[in-house]
Image: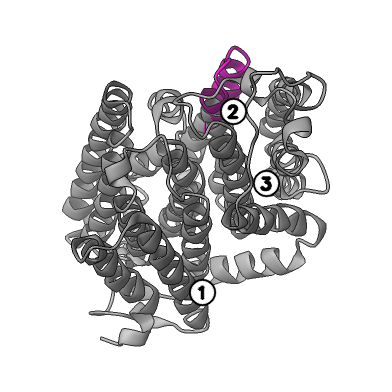
Amino acid sequence: MEPSLFAPELIALLGGLLLFGAPLLGAGSTTNWRLAIVIGLATVAGAIWTLPMSGDAFAPGIYHIDAFSQSVKVVLALGYLLVILGAREPLTLRAHAWCELPMFLLMATVGMMIMVSATELLTLYIGMELAAYPVYIVIALHRNPAVGAESSTKYMVQGMMASAVSLYGMSFLYGLTGSTYFSAMGVQISTLAATPLFWFGIVLLLSGFLFKLAVAPFHFWAADTYEASPHEVITFVASVSKVAAIALLCRIMSLVIPAGSEAMGLQSILMWFALAAMTLGNLAALRQSDLKRLLGYSAVAHAGYALIGVQAMSASGLTAALFYAVGYGAMSLICFLVIAAVGRDQDRVAIEDMSGLWQRSPGMALVFLVGLLGLIGLPPTVGFIGKWFLFSAAIEQGQFMLVLVAAINATIALYYYLVILRQIYLVEATAEAPAVKWTPSLVIATTVGSVIVVGMGVLPGAAWDLAALAVAALLG
């Protein structure tokens, strides 16, 4: 074992122990929050330090370190840090849980890091569960027990079902190959590709990640959980967990791409998933009045867009999906950070609550505008160039009709995003509307997120090259 290869996970694990022990030694929520920021910075630094490294962290074939895994870990660690910066004393969370939130979210981040390096089925499953259970817990810690219990139960029950389906798929793959190692499956892919049971197992395995991504028909949890979760918790779910889910889809697809024409059935299934997610998500969002619920359905639609790159089953498609994952994570992050600030003392945030935000806080209105322009897919944001890359990857595969449907869906989405912008900029704030306060940490988090959204849109070359390098390592 080479400890340096495991640096980001090791730093985060030790940090989790510190965050667990600090309250026992009398540390208050403010001290714990500051400690979480230091740990987040250290985890980001550790992930960046390991970027050029490669090799097996443990026994060969179980846990692999390469440009793909470490690039994703940098994004995951940065996402955790930005969420924590905006999560000081979250009022929609029970006060006694303020010290616990950073620890649980850090443990979920560790689980996601394990997932992106796992090259063996049981290791992958452990990472999935470690990423899921801390989130189940913190959603249940909503200050309103009835609200938190309902949203957490829906998310947990459906998540456990998706996990069980994935585990069932793993059992098929193990039965066919006699091994839980991805490398063994890769060696046998030419033989396995002719076995329908193999593709059945792959589809079942993918189901768990499609659930986390909220792809239809695995999306039923999304709207309810987005609406009824503590604001800061759903900020994490809507941004960091999406990046991890798309990255895992890319890793699984890298196993089957060598199968060539034999994988066309799987490609067709994923294409229909993408069409269903885009269409259902956008049409359902049209009828929403709760802002977080609307963005929940928007997340379903954007999962469909990301799936366009995944189902292309090409290097350019996986690169586009990974690029879009990072951009979408940043767009969602800044939108939910603003929602958390505007609805700081509200269990639910309606679209009307954004009325006159440009008068109450011009800076927050600008940040939210940047996020929404990205979600709409307008330049100069990453949402525009990201969709361009996704659509180009599909066109390369001759999937013009898929791109046409995606473009129509993007046009439909324009309506409900403009409804929000109208409320912010064209509707006067009511006398009862509370003032929205910036905090230095929130300024830093939203600024970094906005720079990523605009920077990747204006100068996408560096991010694209890094994503291409990561996918090359994945396919190598």
- Where residue 237 appears, as percent x and y from the top left, is 44, 43
Look at the image and tell me whether residue 327 can be seen. Answer: yes
Say what secondary structure mark 3 lies in: helix
Question: What residue is pinned by disc 3?
Answer: 390
Give the residue drawn at x 61%, y 65%.
467
Question: What residue is pinned by disc 1?
Answer: 67
Q: Which residues are magenta?
A: 274-295
Give the residue drawn at x 37%, y 67%.
117
Give neighbour class at mark 3: few <14, some 14-19, many 20+ (Cα, 10 Å).
many
- Nearest to N terminus: mark 2 or mark 3: 2
Q: At label 3, which amino acid type do we have? A: Leu
Give the residue drawn at x 61%, y 40%.
338
- Where residue 179 appears, as percent x and y from the top left, is 19, 62
Question: What residue is pinned by disc 2?
Answer: 278
Looking at the picture, does residue 69 appear above or below residue 290? below
Question: Per the image, is 365 magenta?
Answer: no
